[in-house]
Image (cartoon, helix red, strand yellow):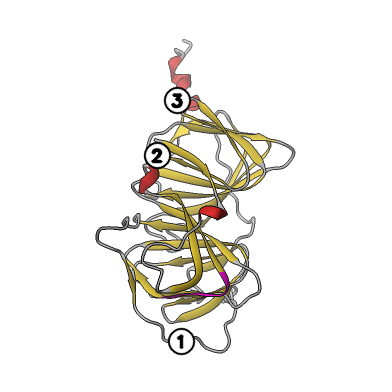
């Protein structure tokens, strides 16, 4: 199973249950049960200037990545401000609230796992009131080793996946088990000019939200053109490949759920197909 769509600001809406507990908040659902996913709740959230979301507790794990604007956050006993390319993890059941005191819309990419329940049944988001905000909210000190579950994306320590039909690919893991995530992985990927990631599949689900550049994506024999704002999702065992296009690197945010197994999470078809050729004596 797979899905390809595009972020549409005109279709963003206040999520069910938030109508009386938020101001200036909307969300565009990109990947959830409606496209065939069983593990992910992926969306783009926006908070208008002077907007807020009341204190909530959620029965899942959440990761956010700020695309633009400034976002003030309560997370348990912590209060801090995030800006573009900052990210934060919200463990299971931790109280959280948001507000925007800036002059620009705050917009962030959001991943939730296990997948939030759809409206109409048991709900996994609980509003628990608001205890007020302090007068000053600071950015987190990322140099302090006591700062946990928050960071700022930098192109440091990339991984370079290798194998047949892979070239120009590097990935930056920033929200994984080492960081504190238990139910998903979030990373950024990049394909250099002429880069290719040949046909492969995984025993998990993946989503890809395009930040910049262009690429052609092949999914189960069909081709799709990816550009900024497009989201693609592949289910368990769905074959897919990427081919960079244009004169700029192709960059995206990727999520995986459940997290990769310790071994054999990447089944590269080109490498395995070599076994079809009998070995020379």
For disc 2, the marked residue is: 235
Tell me whether circle 1 and circle 2 mark residues in contact (CB < 8 Å): no
Q: From the top left corner, tell me how far across and down residue 119 is, in percent.
A: 31, 58
Badge 3 element: helix
Corner quadrant of residue 272: top left
Residue pictured at 34% horizontal, 57% vertical: 116
Q: Which mark is residue 272?
A: 3
In magenta, the rendered stretch is: 48-54
Q: What's the distance in space between the residues labelled 1 and 3, CA to CA?
A: 58 Å
Residue pictured at 46% horizontal, 21% vertical: 273
Q: Which mark is first along the chain, 3 or 1?
A: 1
Residue pictured at 40% horizontal, 47% vertical: 260
Task: Relative to 99, say whether 183 is above or below.
Answer: above
Badge 1 element: loop
Q: Is residue 49 magenta?
A: yes
Please indicate, yes or no, whether residue 262 appears anywhere in the rendered image: no
Q: Which mark is residue 132?
A: 1
Badge 2 element: loop
Q: From the top left corner, tell me how far across and down residue 103 is, in percent.
A: 66, 74
Corner quadrant of residue 265: top left
Q: Nearer the viewer, mark 1 or mark 3?
A: 1
């Amino acid at each position: 199973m797979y899905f390809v769509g595009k972020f549409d600001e005109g279709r963003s809406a206040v999520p069910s249950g938030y109508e009386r507990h938020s101001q200036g908040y909307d969300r565009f659902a990109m990947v959830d049960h409606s496209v065939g996913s069983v593990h992910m709740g992926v969306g783009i959230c926006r908070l208008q200037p002077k907007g807020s979301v009341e204190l909530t507790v959620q029965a899942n794990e959440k990761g956010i990545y700020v695309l633009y604007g400034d976002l003030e956050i309560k997370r348990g006993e912590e209060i801090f401000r995030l800006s573009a390319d900052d990210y934060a993890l919200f463990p299971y059941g931790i109280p959280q609230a948001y507000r925007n005191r800036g002059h620009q819309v705050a917009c962030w990419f959001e991943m939730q796992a296990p997948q939030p329940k759809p409206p109409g049944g048991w709900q996994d988001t609980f509003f628990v009131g608001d205890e007020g905000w302090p007068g000053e909210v600071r950015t987190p000190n990322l140099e302090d080793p006591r700062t946990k579950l928050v960071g700022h994306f930098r192109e440091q320590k990339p991984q370079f996946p290798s194998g047949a039909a892979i070239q120009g690919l590097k990935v930056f893991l920033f929200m994984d088990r080492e960081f504190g995530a238990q139910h998903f992985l979030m990373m950024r990927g990049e394909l250099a000019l002429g880069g290719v990631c040949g046909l492969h599949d995984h025993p998990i689900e993946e989503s890809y939200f395009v930040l910049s550049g262009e690429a052609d994506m092949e999914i189960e024999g069909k081709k799709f053109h990816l550009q900024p704002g497009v989201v693609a999702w592949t289910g368990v065992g769905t074959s897919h490949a990427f081919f960079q296009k244009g004169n700029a690197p192709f960059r995206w945010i990727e999520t995986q759920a459940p997290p990769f197994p310790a071994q054999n999470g990447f089944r590269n078809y080109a490498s395995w197909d070599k076994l079809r050729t009998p070995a020379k004596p």
